[in-house]
Amino acid sequence: MSTSIANAPYHHGNLRQALLEAALMILEKEGEAGLGLRDLARAVGVSPAAPYRHFDSRAALLEALAVTGYQRFTGLMQAVASSDTLDPMTAMGRIYVKFALDNPNLFRLMFSPVLRRDNRPGLQMAAHAAYQTLRHVTGQDLASGRVAALAAWARVHGLAVLLLDGQIAMEAGEDIEALVTAIIDQR
């Protein structure tokens, strides 16, 4: 006897959020290539058509995941920006690299050229909020604040990508957090 969920009535609390959470788990385990709306429906236990009520395409799902990533990322950075830390730039840099290392596939998706921000306003707004948090911490006037924020971003983003790609070999007994801090402090 089949116990297919497909015949069950559609009742699922917050399906959009459940789909996003399941997609985040799939993304981290299998990468972007492992994400499909039908497979996602199966993972959540709903009909194959149900995800289309929230995401009209795979691209829309990827965009929503990237927006979710930026929101989480921005929240972490805002917590640093509003804390009493003596060196918010270093603290924010550490958070940036830690987020990348803890969420490698989400981080790559957030900055993927596949998701062009210019034709995705929600993604553009989410990315801009993260950048504005970084820019705020530089604490300089508008013109030099942009350059300082871009320099800080380039430093931590480059470091994060080098670490993710295995281009920086860790030496025996080396502490990655201490190394990240030392590199970020080289201003």
Image (spheres, grey):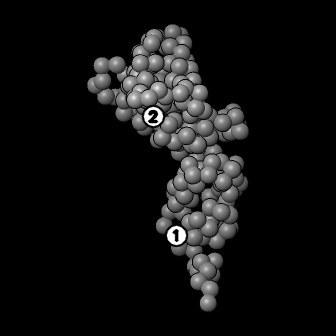
Q: Residue furthest front?
A: 172
Residue in the image at 56% along x and 49% along y: 28
From the viewer's perspective, is the residue at label 2 or at label 1 nearer?
Answer: 2
Question: Residue 14: x percent and y percent?
Answer: 50, 62
Residue in the image at 63% along x and 48% along y: 31
Residue in the image at 62% along x and 40% along y: 109
10 Å crowding of disc 1: few (<14), some (14-19), many (20+): few
Q: Nearer the viewer, residue 143 or 157?
A: 157
Where does the N terminus fall, quadrant-wise? bottom right
**Which amino acid, by three-letter code, is at mark 2?**
Lys
Question: Residue 82: x percent and y percent?
Answer: 34, 28
Q: Could one spot residue 133 in this view of the protein?
A: no
The residue under label 2 is 98
Question: Residue 4: x percent and y percent?
Answer: 61, 80
Q: Nearer the viewer, residue 119 or 43?
A: 43
The local secondary structure at tag 1 comes to: loop
| Residue 6 versus residue 98 in the image, above or below | below
Q: Nearer the viewer, residue 90 or 10?
A: 90
Where does the C terminus fall, quadrant-wise? top left
**Which amino acid, by three-letter code, is at mark 1?**
His
| Mark drawn on residue 12 | 1
Q: Nearer the viewer, residue 22 or 144?
A: 22
Question: Residue 94: x percent and y percent?
Answer: 42, 28
